Image (spheres, rainbow, N blue to C red):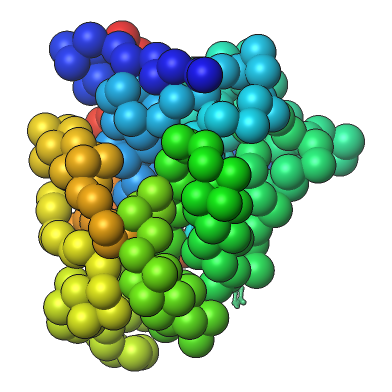
Amino acid sequence: MPQTRPAERSELPGIAQRLRRHIVTSTTAAGSGHPSTSLSMVELLTVLYFGGVLRYDPSDPQDPHRDRFILSKGHGAPGLYAVLAEAGYFPTEELSTLRRLGSPLEGHPNMCRLPGVEASTGSLGQGLSIGLGHALAGRLDGSGYRVYVMLGDGESEEGQVWEAFMYAGNHGLDNLTAIIDHNGYQQTDAVDQVQPLEPLTEKLASFGWAARTIDGHSLDEVIEAFEWARTTKGRPQAIVARTTKGKGVSLLESAPGKWHGKPLPPDEEAKALEEIGAAI
Ligand SMILES: Cc1ncc(C[n+]2csc(CCOP(=O)(O)OP(=O)(O)O)c2C)c(N)n1
Ligand SMILES: [Mg+2]
């Protein structure tokens, strides 16, 4: 059975900082990609992979008993690649090959090319259904693995997402945890302007999920929420994480609609890295 790979609590801020640096440098080197999308989920990814939540083994990525993490908002690939590299799936130096021809670090995650990627995503709206399939299979097989799916809030407007929420709630799939990266923005505008989701937590509860809202940048709240999810029985769990799109880089935070899907230009990179802080 694969194990969690917990870091000390005191190490988590430094890991989050390294992920932010990787996200900025890899997308600026590529000249494309989604840094702001990736930055909003950094604390969530840090706790999943280093806070003792996910059970995984980079030397045996297909272990049938591993926990699954599915990045449904696949355009957040730079964030996923950063945490997979830090977790030991591949050397961090390879992050600079993001989006290069021939690199397995494609613009959106490709499960056929990169160990640690559980689902090929990028066409939004599908990841929760894929996770649901894993969760059902785990129940049928009597395996104790758990499934975690990260969704965007804009993505959560899609119909297929609500079919999956409905099915998982109706079938009491308590080995399934959804994390909604509720950064308030989608591609061009605020979610509230396009298709308001509120009251999101209450809607999820009405679909049979155990649901709660947290500050997605508070490591302590994220740690506590994953522990709550793991120990909740009889119902799937939804963690609605309030986050900031572009968190940690003031230019990206200042205009989330404008910066969606845009890397920082090279002349803004040094300032961004200074804001994030020197690598620990
Ligand atoms: C099915 C589908 N429709 C449209 C897109 C184009 N698209 C890429 S990112 C995005 C916005 C997603 O917003 P959100 O889910 O809130 O993610 P965020 O970047 O804010 O984390 C859209 C519409 C897509 N990838 N897939
Ligand atoms: Mg969003």
Q: Position of residue 212 (x, y in %)?
A: 15, 60
Looking at the rendering, which quadrant does residue 259 occupy?
Answer: bottom left
Which residue is farthest right? 102
Q: Position of residue 209 (x, y in %)?
A: 26, 68
**270 displayed left or right of 212:** right
Relative height, residue 237 to residue 165 (above, below): above
**109 displayed left or right of 205:** right
Q: Number of marks in the image?
A: 0
Q: In this view of the protein, can residue 175 be seen by the observer? A: yes
Question: Which corner quadrant holds the C terminus?
Answer: top left
Relative height, residue 198 to residue 183 (above, below): below
Q: Name the residue rendered at 34%, 90% in the picture.
A: 195
Residue situated in front as seen by the camera: 133 or 253: 133
Q: Name the residue rendered at 45%, 53% in the picture.
A: 149
Residue situated in front as seen by the camera: 228 or 245: 228
Q: Position of residue 39 (x, y in %)?
A: 37, 44
Looking at the rendering, which quadrant does residue 106 occupy?
Answer: top right
Looking at the rendering, which quadrant does residue 102 occupy?
Answer: top right
Q: Position of residue 273 (x, y in %)?
A: 36, 28
Q: In this view of the protein, can residue 273 be seen by the observer? A: no
Q: Name the residue rendered at 60%, 18% in the picture.
A: 58
Relative height, residue 91 to residue 189 (above, below): above
